[in-house]
Image (spheres, rainbow, N blue to C red):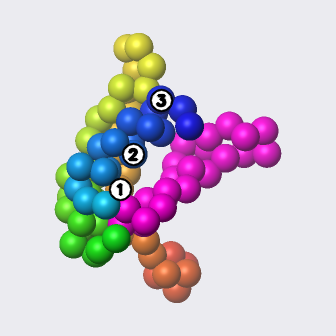
Amino acid sequence: LSPVCLGSLRRAAKFGEYKDCIIQKDENGKSRGFGFINFQNSEDAKKAVEGLHKREIDIKEGEKMALYASRAQTKRENAR
């Protein structure tokens, strides 16, 4: 995993234990810039979303980006 991905996992882990994490990659194995973290319980997931959404992180020297964090949506919710 890239340092940015590892840093995101460390930040998320502060909110509770997670079951798994998936970083989406392109056909060359390079991160597509997003992923999913599945927490052990929903309360920890809710705290992570509240604590991480729109938080700015350093991605490169002198370059920042804001995290987008939300709960998983069903296909039906996502289609709206």
Q: Secondary structure at mark 1?
A: loop
Answer with left or right where residue 56 lies relative to residue 28: left
Q: Amino acid at mark 1?
A: Ala
Residue 52 percent across, percent down from the top left: 27, 49
N-term mark: 2 or 1: 2
> Which residue in the structure is indicated by mark 1?
69
Q: Quadrant of residue 29?
A: top right
- How far is mark 3 from mark 1, CA to CA? 18 Å
Q: Which mark is residue 29?
A: none
Q: Which mark is residue 3?
A: 3
Q: Which residues are magenta?
A: 18-39
N-term mark: 3 or 1: 3
Q: Does the magenta-highlighted stretch encompass residue 1?
A: no
- How far is mark 2 from mark 3, CA to CA? 10 Å
Say which of 29 and 55 sits in front.
29
Q: Amino acid at mark 3?
A: Pro
Picture residue at 43% right of the left edge, 71% below the top: 72
Q: Quadrant of residue 27?
A: top right
- How far is mark 2 from mark 1, CA to CA? 12 Å
> Which residue in the structure is indicated by mark 2?
9
> In the figure, 35 relative to 40: above or below?
above
- Can you tell which of label 2 and label 1 is closer to the viewer? 2
Picture residue at 38% right of the left edge, 14% below the top: 62
Q: Amino acid at mark 2?
A: Leu
Q: Secondary structure at mark 2?
A: helix
Say which of 75 and 2 sits in front.
2
**Direction right: furthest residue:** 27
**Direction top: furthest residue:** 61
- Can you tell which of label 3 and label 1 is closer to the viewer? 3
Residue 38 percent across, percent down from the top left: 42, 66
